[in-house]
Amino acid sequence: MTPLETLDSAGHKIFFQTRLKELTSLLEAQKYSKVFLLTDEHTSVKCLPVLQEMLANFEDFDLIETSAGEENKTIDFCIGIWKTLLDFGADRKSLMINLGGGVVTDMGGFIASTYKRGIDFINIPTTLLSMVDASVGGKTGIDVDAAKNMVGTFSLPQMVFIEPEFLHTLPERELLSGFAEMIKHGLIADKDFFYKLIKSDYRTPLPEDIYHSVKIKNDVVTEDPKEKNIRKILNFGHTIGHAVESYSLLHDESPLTHGEAIAIGFVCEAALSVNNSNLPKNELKEIADYITSIYPNYKIKEETFEELYLLMQSDKKNEDGNILFSLLENIGHCTYNCRVNKKDVFSALKYYNTLS
Ligand SMILES: NC(=O)c1ccc[n+]([C@@H]2O[C@H](COP(=O)([O-])OP(=O)(O)OC[C@H]3O[C@@H](n4cnc5c(N)ncnc54)[C@H](O)[C@@H]3O)[C@@H](O)[C@H]2O)c1
């Protein structure tokens, strides 16, 4: 397959299907003092061999492996990795390459952007979710207890490489998780893309759809890198979705993935959109029918609504104590900074429960 067009993103480039060739040039040109490769326990087994096949002479690096999973996106893991960097003699001219899903790219970006006040880093996303969302846009971060992404930086990687070949080993559930962020891009910015995606198979995402999804995200973050205004539309589904995800991480034996949780958020926030931003009811039904046809059923118990609402109150988009939602005006258009009353939020959670 020929490489897709390279995207410019506020000072760095996103390369598609170039088999990491520009990384070789960067390593030759920059003469980094040391190169660190951050993986998790799965990507070191499944993805490192693929990377080494793409970069035949890439041997001079130190591998740092972390445990897999959202529950490890914590300050304790960062401290361990900062200490490892110190032990290995990392200085300001070192490079960190993050090879993994959103947990590795979020946490690795945060570690790199704070170590010795910041070293260069590169993202090589290996999940669908991190390809179309987490690795692009410069948000790095870690969770604080149940509060998602509470501490972090806006820091751009030197380069991002998107190689769909890494997806060959990704479990189906993780493909479904990443597909949610692609659907979101259609819902907030491109109606035709949404209708194209819902006719496609999430198990075999097409490179051109991955590319288009990244392009939507990249266009938005390039216009508003620090989330002062339009970038907030990317949070559609995430106010309720993050609360459900945090709740599930705390209480469920087998927690929801990020994508499963925000897919619930899409349905609830589409329901909120009917009263608060004039989303036509038939479009709510289309969204709800589609989401419930591919994502697993999840019961949001009514006695947990207050706890979920408390979690929403710690959302980073809030201002002056008000929860601010990004809501749909119709499929393909999203507005932001919407205040919604608590009763409507509870009705939206109840609406979701009626679907299962
Ligand atoms: N920074 C942002 O803008 C942004 C945007 C969206 C999501 N996020 C964050 O991304 C995180 C979720 O990312 P994720 O869904 O990629 O989760 P993840 O990083 O936990 O990866 C999911 C699982 O897939 C495994 N894996 C990764 N690549 C693989 C491969 N090619 N083959 C086999 N297994 C593989 C991982 O080891 C892990 O077990 C969340 O923490 C979320 O907050 C960040």
Image: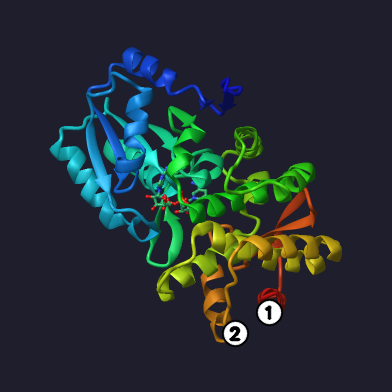
Amino acid of disc 1: Lys
Q: How is the image coloured?
A: rainbow
In the rendered view, tell whether residue 269 sits above or below residue 303: above
Q: Residue at x 68, y 68 (%)?
A: 268
Indicate the quadrant containing the N terminus: top left, top right, bottom left or bottom right. top right
Q: Give residue 47's position: percent from left, percent from top.
A: 36, 38
Q: Residue at x 69, y 46 (%)?
A: 200
- Residue extending furthest toward the bottom: 303
Q: Give residue 293's position: percent from left, percent from top.
A: 68, 63
What residue is shown with label 1? 350
Query: Is residue 313 something that shows in the picture?
Result: no
Q: Residue at x 60, y 33 (%)?
A: 207
What residue is shown with label 2? 302
198 or 95, nearer to the observer: 198
Query: Is residue 59 something that shows in the picture?
Result: yes
7 or 354, nearer to the observer: 354
